[in-house]
Amino acid sequence: MGPSYRLSLFRRSVNIPAAGASAVSPGAVDGGDLAPLLPAILFYVQSPSLTAGQLPDGETITYTLVEGNDPAFASPTSSTVMGVQTGAGGAGAAAAIFAAPGKFQGGKYVGLKITASAGANAAGVSITLAIAQT
């Protein structure tokens, strides 16, 4: 039997940024630490429901899995859009779970980038990137 991992230890949080901006999770997960689990892991975020005031009709919050050689992701080696929350029907957006596998294409670190469209107003809501074993 292989090593046992507490997957809850592999969590990184980032706040949704101000309108029209992006934010990347600090202290990204070191992909080298995950090597024994590959390819049996999936990265995921659980986005909360957002009110119409936070995410008006047509405005979006985009969740992107990023990988790079430095934890600040100055030059990402890959990125994968995990999902997009869109305000609709005057009701904001429902809670959702978005997931994607890592590409592990030369990047040592894995993190979460969140981009808010110009009219989004959900700044400060915390989102956590976590992993699940498949």
Image (spheres, rainbow, N blue to C red):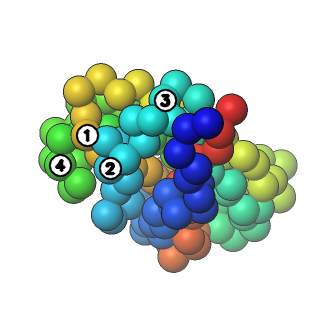
Rounded to the nearest angstrom, the CA distance separating label 2 from label 4 is 9 Å
N-terminal label among 4 and 3: 3
N-terminal label among 2 and 3: 2
Q: Which residue position is annotated with label 2? A: 30
Rounded to the nearest angstrom, the CA distance separating label 1 from label 4 is 7 Å
Residue 18 seen in render: yes
Judge by depth and name the residue closer to the eye, 15 or 108. Answer: 108
Looking at the image, residue 42 sits to the left or right of residue 116; the answer is: right
Looking at the picture, how far across and down is residue 52, in whole percent?
74, 64
Instruction: Indicate the amino acid at tag 3.
Output: Leu
Q: Which residue position is annotated with label 3? A: 38
Q: Secondary structure at mark 4?
A: loop
Q: Which mark is residue 5?
A: none
C-beta proximity under 8 Å, tags 2 and 1: yes
Q: Which residue position is annotated with label 1? A: 108
Q: Which residue position is annotated with label 4? A: 70
Rounded to the nearest angstrom, the CA distance separating label 4 from label 3 is 20 Å
Looking at the picture, how far across and down is residue 55, in whole percent?
65, 59
- Indicate the quadrant where residue 25 lies: bottom left
N-terminal label among 1 and 4: 4
Q: Secondary structure at mark 2?
A: strand
How many residues crowd around disc 3 within 10 Å: few (fewer than 14), some, or many (20 or more)? some
How many residues crowd around disc 4 within 10 Å: few (fewer than 14), some, or many (20 or more)? some
Judge by depth and name the residue closer to the eye, 52 or 125. Answer: 125
Rounded to the nearest angstrom, the CA distance separating label 2 from label 3 is 13 Å
